[in-house]
Image (spheres, rainbow, N blue to C red):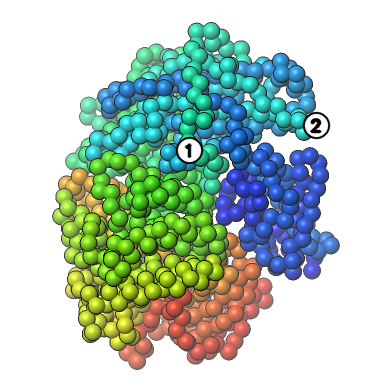
Amino acid sequence: MTRQHVLVQEVWLENRRGLDGLGIGETRPRLSWVATATAAAWELELLRDDGTVEHAVSTSGSTRLVEWPFTPLASRRGGLLRVRAALADAAWGPSLRVEAGLLDRADWAVPFVSPSTAEPAGSAAELRPGYLLRATWDARELGVDPARIKRARVYATAHGVYELELNGSPVAEDLLSPGWTSYSHRLRTQTYDVTDALVDGRNAIGAWLADGWYRGRIGFDGGLWNVYGTDVALLLQLELVLDDGRLVRVPLEDAWSWHPSPITQVGLYEGERHDARLLPAGWSLPGFDDGEWSAPALLPLDGFDAQLEPPTGPPVRVIEALRPQSVERLEGGRIRLDFGQNVSGKLRIAVDGPAGHAVRLHHAEVLENGALGVRPLRAAVSIDEYVCAGGGVESWSPRFTIHGFRYAELENWPGDLDTVDVEALVVHTDLVRTGWFESSHPALNRLHENVVWSMRDNFVDLPTDCPQRDERLGWTGDIQVFAPTALRLFAAHGTLSGWLRDVAAEQAEQGHVPNFVPWIECGFPNFPTAAWGDAAVIVPWELYQHDGDLRVLVDQYDSMRGWVDLVDRLTGGTGLWNTGFQLGDWLDPAAPPDNPGQSHTDKHLVATAYHVRTARIMAETAALLGRADDEERYRRIAERALAAFRSEYLSPAGRIVSDTPTSIALALMFDLFASEEQEQRAGERLVELVAANDFRISTGFVGTPIICDALAKAGAMDAAYHLLLQDQLPSWLYQVGMGATTIWERWDSMLPDGTVNPGDMTSFNHYALGAVAGFMHRVIAGLDTASPGGDQLRIAPHPGGGLRHASASHLGPLGLATSSWRREGELFTLDVLIPVGATARVHLPDGSEVRGLGAGAHTFTCVVRDAASDPSRPRQRWRGGPHQDDAAPAASVTASPVETGETVASPS
């Protein structure tokens, strides 16, 4: 084997694909890489910063989560890592910078600096301002020759949100740092490499600083101010490493000064007002005269208890810029922009106006009655204002606010339409895209893109419900149902594992898992709630299923166990959870606008079903971690809950209390039936109910993510397709037909006449109901995993619905996998790509299968007749899930890689 046949293409640390290795929090980060071929052994090299080189050989053959083979990292220590196959002529893969951040609290030797320690709570009319901080230093004054500086690092975080400049230029592209965590428990720190930005002589560092989530208004029903403290403050430590390895901390404590910024008012929900006339020219340059600036307060670090820790996920950034698809002047003078896509973000304008001229920027997701539909925004007025400095074209975008919008209106624009130069900046966590779907059905493709966009727009540092109104909270129920789909679409493990740390912290403080995390007391009931609190168990489990990494189960074990134990106590040890507050099948389409929890499905049926599921997961988790006593205990809890469910909600004939699609779908997908006969009868009843409703949606947050899978499991793929492709209200494609570019919170967020749902809670950007995209990948295109981590794949496409072709691809831990099928008359052709290190079992629609398919590209054909033209053809049953692998006869042929050009025909 020669080197061109084994190339390492990508390397990353832990499960944080796409995140660089600077400022990590692990001393022994695990390593993963993707290669073009397998190898019996891999050589790893670490070129340390002190010039020494460490080599190691991994003989496991694995390329995923390989244990750190080198000397453990200490704070600030690192080097360049690279990997190659352990072959004489193998080429090295790309280098990855690996460097620990400040790992111990004792590494921090500086105080917070605060320009504002106790501002009174503001209001929507009187938002608080932003601030500027600056400090200067000269290396020579510290006895350091600038030529000997090998590395320079800034370690920073804030109470509030901040951006840094060094010698007049931005330090990074990160936005809204340090992001939102449960600040009482955890505060993330950032590490920036500023080596190349230093100059010989005096240097200046500057910071923009504002309230953000820390003390700005957050939450609904009026919101809350000063949730985490009354100060807004910056924590910044600047360190130099010299060529002899000596560490020099630049003493900035007494060098800081502050001044009001040109941001005169700002709120995450409300918007930002920026008066460019107030910007001190050159304020972050070394030669600036800051004699009139004030000294900030110094707040000792030991006065704050929160854990300081590096981030586990990528930062928030501007991901792309959209130009408006239409620009029109309205009666009254405003200029309306339609960007053609609902986004989370902000506008960037280039405006030429006289000094003092104010341009206001208004935002909304939809239009209603010819005007911006702002009522759903509630108290999040979403208005930015820019006051021109004068003297030419000025480019500006707000720093510390974010909006959800497709439409914008410019008020008081100083020019004609041809002078409008405005972009929509799409802002969210900088996640790596990992999942794609495409079919011959344009509306289905648009639906999938709507799901992708809603995930993007709602991953602004943490998984939220919506990006636009006065809420934007980390609702646990939303990500619980959406996590499997999220992990197919994007490399979200780092973001979600960090959020789960907050779940555990809030759970320990509250005594249960709150309905949203971070938790704030803004008026919503704070009680244990099924399907929402179950996120503490299900989200870690889904992360394990996707990545095959037991560590997330180890890290979250106490949180997972705490939730199941709590529910067991709430049932009195009976397994029947039939008391207390519940949200149930939230937003059942039959629920009235002002009572979204009024579902047709018994709320306690939902609660008990989830208790069975999470107790089973807990038992499996304990088994995986070798905790035999716990495994036995949670199996007993699961058995009690299952017996209680069957006794309370299931008839011997298989009928379910409530007799709704959601109740039956839960029982089917959670394996709650006592016999195959019950399951079959329930499946038939599910089809009857769905058909009786003319294949329109009749499920809410709990039922919708699993309804198509339940129909497929019942052997009713035609019904699943009919439901998925329905375009009448309520349905997924109704939204597409109404021009949606994201997933709505309500099926009828916009009514057929174009008016907005009258309910107080109406978002046009919620990802939860878009969990059906997972069904499109797994079942329609047929691309699924058969083992945690994806080293075993299941390829089982289910053609139907009049589709001529469909395909799904997923960039998993081992590389890219694809399942792509097309129909030409009765000829069915399937193209499959299996990544290196994985094998697949392929199920063809004619009932044949191929087992043990290895890496490479493969093609299969078979004959598929429509059921309508072939009455003898059995109903096609769903092949999915670890316990649903039906025993189809194995094909006697072996697929050949595409390199041979051979097409493999299935035996008929």
Q: Earlier in the sequence, mark 1 or mark 2?
A: 2
Q: Amino acid at mark 2?
A: Asp
| Residue 306 badge | 1
Mark 2 crowd level (few <14, some 14–19, many ≥20, 10 Å Cα): few
Residue under the image location 34 percent in, 80 percent down? 715
Q: Which mark is in front, 1 or 2? A: 1
- Marks 1 and 2 close (CB-CB < 8 Å): no
Residue under the image location 62 percent in, 48 percent down? 26
Q: Judge whether 487 appears above or below 613 on screen.
A: above
In the image, taking residue 878 as reference, residue 608 lies left or right, namely left
Residue under the image location 28 percent in, 66 percent down? 572
Q: Amino acid at mark 1?
A: Ala
In the image, taking residue 844 as reference, residue 565 lies left or right, namely left
Q: Residue furthest top?
A: 291
How many marks the image carries: the answer is 2
Could you tell me if residue 101 is visible in this image? yes
Pick the front one: 897 or 265: 265
